[in-house]
Image (tube, rainbow, N blue to C red):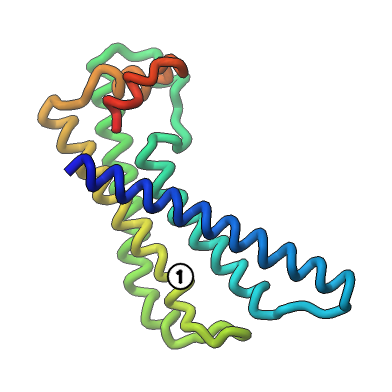
Amino acid sequence: MQVLVRLFFRFLDILLGLLLAAMALMVFVNVVMRYTMNSGIAVSDELARFAFVWLTFIGAVVGYHHRLHIGMETVVSQFKRRGRLVLMGLSDLLILGCAIVLTVGTWKQLPINASMSAPVTGLSMAWVYGIGLFTGAGIIVITLERLFRLVTGRMTEAEIRAFGGEMDPHDHTAEERMK
């Protein structure tokens, strides 16, 4: 199972790189064309915006998986192990609630977005805004797995220390245990 998770997130890392490269290339080509030929490719502007939305939402899942999201480590570091576990649980419950709101809201909004088309490409706007389903569902799955490990006592000491901001940046073994 761990191998599949690593492959999945490796795939997402590659996808993010491709989206970023495509976005940069489309914008660069359009800028060059506007300054040299006084024209541009309208489709590339729109597709670059769509790529940016996907990049942001997929990146949110990847960042959350790697625990790169914003935390209140200054507050958490004041607590001992038990307090950190409680705060970790509360944090995960809040995140779970927000992810559920995102997923349900996206699901309810999807028919409206599907009925609208992008002005240049004519693509259904569901392709743009539907990425919220992936993001919400991804964060829900990650959070449920973390809550399960927290409740069953399988949270590693490295994860608890990292939650309080105490991870040594050179301690790669702690990072590996967190994955």
Q: Count of labels shown? A: 1
Instruction: Name the residue beneath numbered marker 1.
Output: 129
Q: Which image quadrant for residue 150?
A: top left
SS class, disc 1: helix
User: 2 and 115: which one is in front?
Assistant: 2
Instruction: Establish if 164 lies above or below 132.
Output: above
**Relative image position of residue 41 (x, y in whole percent):** 72, 79
The 10 Å Cα crowd at callout 1, few under 14, some 14 to 19, many 20 or more, is some
Q: Which image quadrant for residue 66?
A: top left
For image coordinates 13% across by 25% down, the residue present is 153
For image coordinates 25% across by 17% down, the residue present is 157
Instruction: Establish if 68 lies above or below 137.
Output: above
For image coordinates 28% across by 34% down, the residue present is 90
Residue 118 seen by the camera? yes
Amino acid type assigned to the residue bearing label 1 in the image: Tyr
For image coordinates 29% across by 57% down, the residue present is 137
**Relative image position of residue 143 (x, y in whole percent):** 26, 43
